[in-house]
């Protein structure tokens, strides 16, 4: 299991890339997931030239870091067919960037837009019909998560797409800050995680608030929040400040043997407090290490077919 720091923590901070990479290294991390509009890029076709990609590769190595995965995303489930096909071209360029970087893993989201989820699922799967064989041919893997306001927000609905392809090139990403959106506010951590067991390869670590509890978030105009038109969640860097039960998270991951696999990734993914990146990053890294590194599984895992019967 690799422990990584996601670069989204540094959005719009004015930090240079060297400063960002240095900050991750100072927090004690060996791995980083770069994520920025310019590098590696998202939504629009990546603009970094090959020479610029090589510069990042050297800068990351000079900071003493390695890349665990590239965080990115394109509109591969958009109802507009031109936009969807364009997204495939964007993915192909991102794959070229990964080859220059010697990176084998990406992580991404299903895609926004809760209107007409059946059509958006069909568009996504049409995109995956192209991308999965391409990734398989290159020995690469794409880790996919459901995000609040995606066409599928619930854990099981998102995972079922991954389960359908049953490919080593496609894996499931569980984002802990999305826990309460994964099942409509229940926060049933064990059931959500274990449903994805066969393909769970990536977990994002940050705390969040239970959006179903009164005044956890203050959003105006409040009726939009009350009727579900607006989605709210946080990525709190100091685990334990929010409503997530991390003892249950760690226990379940150990039960699943997530920490004993060579190809899994545990990523620290804070947002909103870049000035606390080193402090929170070091704290979270130690917490992950204390609970998942060199800590054996605590029970015999359920059969791989568990998820099929977990609904």
Image (cartoon, helix red, strand yellow):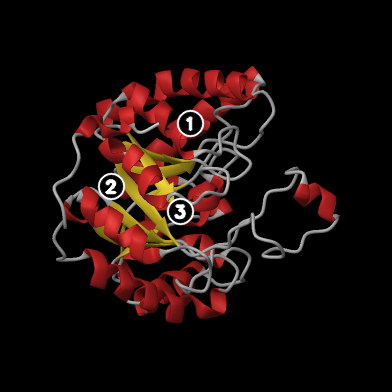
The residue labelled by disc 3 is: 52
**Viewer-closest of 156 and 186:** 186
Label 2 vs 3, first from the N-terminus: 3
User: Mark 3: which secondary structure?
Assistant: helix
Q: Please determine whether, in this image, residue 21 is positioned above or below residue 154.
A: below
Other residues around mark 1 within 10 Å, as few (<14) / some (14–19) / many (≥20) = some
Along the line of sight, the residue nearer the viewer: 293 or 79: 293
Q: CA distance from mark 2 to mark 3?
A: 15 Å
Quadrant for residue 283, please give it. bottom left
Residue 34 seen in the figure: yes
Q: Position of residue 199 (x, y in %)?
A: 29, 37
Q: Residues within 10 Å of mark 3 (few under 14, many from 20)?
A: few
Lateral position of residue 94 relative to residue 219, left or right? left
Residue 210 x/y as whole percent: 58, 59
Quadrant in which the N terminus is drawn: bottom left
Q: Earlier in the sequence, mark 1 or mark 2?
A: 2
- Cα gap from disc 3 to disc 1, whole angstroms: 38 Å
**Residue at coordinates 76% horizontally, 51% vertically from top-left?**
225
Pick the residue in front: 135 or 252: 252
Instruction: Name the secondary structure under disc 2.
Output: loop
Residue at which label 2 appears = 102
Query: From what the image shows, is residue 260 above or below residue 166?
Result: below
Give SS at disc 1: helix
- From the image, state whether disc 1 or disc 2 is nearer to you: 1
Tell me the quarter of the picture where residue 288 sits: bottom left
Q: Are marks 1 and 2 in contact (CB under 8 Å)?
A: no
What's the mark number on residue 157? 1
Residue at 35% x, 60% y: name it: 248
Q: Earlier in the sequence, mark 3 or mark 1?
A: 3
Could you tell whether 307 is left or right of 192 in the image?
A: left
If the image is split into quadrants, where does the C terminus sit? top left
Say whether marks 2 and 3 touch (CB < 8 Å).
Answer: no
């Amino acid at each position: 299991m690799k422990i990584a720091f996601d670069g989204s923590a540094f959005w719009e901070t004015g930090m240079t890339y060297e400063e960002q990479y240095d900050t991750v290294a100072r927090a004690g991390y060996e791995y980083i997931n770069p994520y920025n509009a310019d590098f590696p890029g998202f939504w629009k076709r990546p603009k970094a030239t090959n020479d610029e990609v090589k510069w990042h590769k050297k800068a990351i190595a000079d900071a003493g870091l390695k890349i665990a995965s590239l965080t990115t995303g394109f509109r591969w489930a958009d109802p507009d067919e031109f936009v969807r096909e364009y997204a495939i071209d964007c993915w192909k360029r991102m794959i070229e960037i990964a080859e220059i970087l010697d990176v084998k893993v990406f992580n991404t989201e299903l895609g926004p837009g809760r209107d007409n989820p059946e059509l958006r699922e069909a568009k996504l799967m049409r995109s995956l019909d192209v991308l999965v064989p391409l990734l398989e041919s290159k020995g690469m893997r794409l880790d996919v998560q459901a995000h609040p306001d995606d066409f599928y927000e619930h854990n099981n609905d998102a995972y079922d797409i991954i389960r359908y392809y049953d490919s080593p090139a496609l894996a499931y990403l569980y984002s802990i800050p999305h826990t309460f959106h994964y099942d409509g506010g229940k926060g049933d951590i064990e059931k959500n995680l274990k449903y994805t067991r066969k393909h769970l390869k990536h977990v994002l670590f940050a705390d969040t608030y239970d959006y179903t509890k009164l005044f956890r978030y203050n959003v105006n105009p409040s009726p939009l929040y009350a009727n579900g038109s607006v989605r709210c969640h946080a990525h709190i860097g100091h685990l334990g400040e929010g409503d997530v039960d991390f003892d249950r998270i760690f226990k379940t991951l150990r039960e699943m043997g997530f920490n004993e696999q060579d190809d899994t990734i545990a990523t620290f993914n804070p947002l909103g407090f870049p000035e606390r990146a080193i402090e929170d990053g070091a704290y979270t890294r130690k917490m992950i290490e204390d609970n998942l590194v060199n800590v054996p599984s605590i029970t015999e895992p359920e059969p791989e077919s568990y998820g099929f019967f977990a609904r």
